[in-house]
Image (cartoon, rainbow, N blue to C red):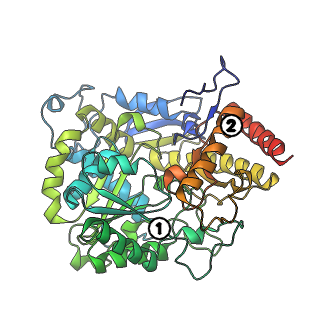
């Protein structure tokens, strides 16, 4: 940890490529020159000659004197409205929850079901101070201390702290590589399919959970799109998990915090790359879901603005559940992590605003324009990294979403001990060999990646590269350093 990080003052320092932040969000939004704060009232924030950045839009909306988008009649008002100084509903201001519900409907359901009969119900939305806060609270009301939460590997390392520190959950990694018809070949690239959970892997983890805790597991947590793999689970995989959870009466929580950062929309077979668990788990029969998606009691969602909009500093998370038994305690528990009224108003304005394009078009929502431009920027950066990896003959999972590429550096690990194989290698050996490579990359070559073993990967030698965590100049320097590392190590 005591390594010097790169900066203009310390050019030999390590490049930080392990924190899931998106510096590409600072780029101007292509062809967007203004923002229409309220399409009904016709309030124009600005129209200029230059393309606006996200920070420009936030500044305009935060200083707005135009009435709330939810107000039926526009009226003159202050930046800080009178009712905002008092206590707010613990689950979030109604108008902000309505804006979030509408946004999630368009992001998660409409793309695959353009005319859905069921929709997000704002009354079932809970807004809290970040995704980790609402996830912790959701697990607290779904599980008792000591109950198991199953998570397919590899997974976001902070899940372990988020769900154990106060909620007291017991984390059970769901390993997947040994539960497919084909087997992982020693030293060969590992295809995405080996990372998919299925009934066999879930049943084994279920039995292990029961053995560890003396009772059935309560939660299956999916990261979809997946962090750290940078891929989406195919719809059939997510559906299998939903069906299994409902049969086993295990709660499925789908963490879809990267849903707006899917930068390859179609698979090679023409199938949609990302299909939300909210679309797959919802009911098409409006009579069974008069107010909601028809998810039933076992399917839940967590989301935040921290990744798709790079707004981690605002601390805006959202959870969605249609389980009536937990909704009230979930709302009450959220009292400890409410979002300020001022931030909720800013979020409402952000999600309701329309973009003003250079050709005068005002029909598009700002969020749609921004996410499209951001996705193009992410894809361009991703292709640049993957082209470099191809050139150096380094295997990786082709990324279709998120801010990262999962790289296979097994070639550069210290050798296995005599008689050991990747499949039989001890955990201690995996961690020791990978840590040696991790430290060499960081200290000798100035590259700070996330090591796979810290994310409970099954094999040593895999690293997550967050290709959006650096400026253009830093990223290009990172590619130069990576090539130098490969050349020197292969000599």
Residue most extreme to the top: 9
Specify whether 388 is left or right of 362. right
Which x, y percent locates residue 396?
68, 58
For label 2, the crowd category at 10 Å Cα-Cα, with few meaning under 14, some 14 to 19 and many 20 or more, is: many
Q: Does residue 364 appear anywhere in the picture? A: no
- Residue located 59% across and 55% down the image: 430
Q: Quadrant of residue 406?
A: bottom right
Q: Is residue 294 above or below residue 6?
A: below
Q: Does residue 289 appear anywhere in the picture? A: yes
Q: Observer-nearest residue: 124 or 76?
A: 124
Q: Observer-nearest residue: 374 or 388?
A: 388
Q: Is residue 236 above or below residue 228?
A: below
- Residue located 43% across and 69% down the image: 114
Which x, y percent locates residue 229?
56, 57
Residue 455 image label? none
Which x, y percent locates residue 320?
28, 58
Residue holding disc 1: 275
The residues bearing labels 1 and 2 have C-alpha atoms spaced at a distance of 31 Å
Residue most extreme to the front: 418
Residue most extreme to the right: 491
Q: Observer-nearest residue: 416 or 197?
A: 416
Q: Observer-nearest residue: 489 or 351?
A: 489
Which x, y percent locates residue 119?
30, 65
- Could you tell me which secondary element the residue under label 2 belongs to? helix
- Residue located 48% across and 77% down the image: 236
Residue holding disc 2: 475
- Could you tell me which secondary element the residue under label 1 belongs to? loop
Specify whether 271 is left or right of 325. right
Q: Quadrant of residue 182?
A: bottom right
């Amino acid at each position: 940890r005591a390594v010097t990080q790169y900066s203009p003052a310390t050019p030999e320092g390590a490049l930080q490529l392990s924190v899931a932040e998106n510096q590409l969000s600072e780029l101007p939004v292509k062809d967007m020159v203004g923002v229409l704060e309220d399409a009904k009232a016709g309030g124009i924030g600005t129209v200029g000659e230059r393309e606006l950045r996200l920070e420009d839009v936030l500044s305009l909306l935060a200083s707005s004197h135009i009435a709330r988008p939810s107000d039926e009649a526009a009226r003159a008002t202050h930046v800080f409205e009178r009712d905002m100084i008092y206590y707010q509903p613990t689950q979030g201001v109604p108008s902000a929850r309505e804006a979030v519900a509408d946004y999630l409907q368009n992001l998660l359901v409409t793309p695959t079901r353009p005319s859905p009969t069921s929709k997000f119900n704002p009354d079932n939305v809970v807004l809290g101070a970040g995704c980790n806060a609402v996830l912790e609270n959701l697990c607290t009301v779904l599980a008792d201390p000591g109950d198991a939460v199953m998570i397919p590997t590899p997974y976001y390392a902070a899940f372990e702290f988020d769900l154990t520190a106060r909620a007291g959950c017991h984390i059970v990694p769901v390993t997947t590589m040994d539960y497919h018809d084909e087997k992982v070949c020693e030293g060969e690239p590992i295809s995405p399919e080996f990372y998919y959970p299925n009934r066999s892997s879930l049943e084994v983890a279920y039995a292990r959970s029961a053995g560890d805790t003396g009772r059935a597991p309560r939660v299956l947590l999916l990261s979809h799109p997946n962090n750290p793999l940078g891929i989406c689970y195919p719809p059939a995989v997510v559906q299998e998990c939903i069906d299994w959870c409902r049969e086993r009466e295990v709660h499925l929580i789908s963490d879809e915090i990267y849903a707006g950062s899917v930068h390859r929309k179609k698979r090679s077979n023409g199938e949609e790359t990302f299909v939300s668990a909210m679309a797959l788990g919802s009911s098409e029969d409006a009579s069974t879901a008069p107010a909601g998606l028809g998810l039933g009691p076992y399917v839940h969602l967590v989301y935040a603005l921290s990744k798709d909009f790079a707004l981690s500093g605002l601390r805006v998370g959202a959870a969605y559940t249609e389980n009536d038994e937990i909704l009230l305690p979930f709302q009450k528990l959220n009292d400890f992590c409410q979002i300020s009224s001022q931030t909720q108003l800013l979020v409402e304005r952000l999600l309701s605003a329309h973009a003003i394009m250079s050709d005068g078009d005002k029909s598009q929502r700002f969020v749609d324009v921004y996410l499209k431009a951001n996705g193009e920027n992410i894809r361009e950066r991703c292709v640049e990294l993957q082209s470099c990896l191809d050139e150096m003959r380094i295997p990786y999972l082709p990324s279709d979403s998120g801010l990262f590429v999962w790289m296979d550096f097994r070639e550069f690990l210290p050798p296995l001990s005599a008689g050991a194989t990747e499949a039989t290698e001890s955990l201690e050996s995996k961690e020791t060999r990978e840590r040696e490579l991790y430290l060499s990359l960081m200290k000798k070559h100035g590259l700070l990646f996330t090591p796979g073993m810290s994310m409970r990967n099954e094999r040593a030698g895999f690293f997550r590269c967050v290709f959006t965590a650096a400026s253009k100049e830093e990223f290009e320097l990172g590619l130069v350093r990576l090539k130098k590392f490969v050349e020197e190590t292969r000599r």
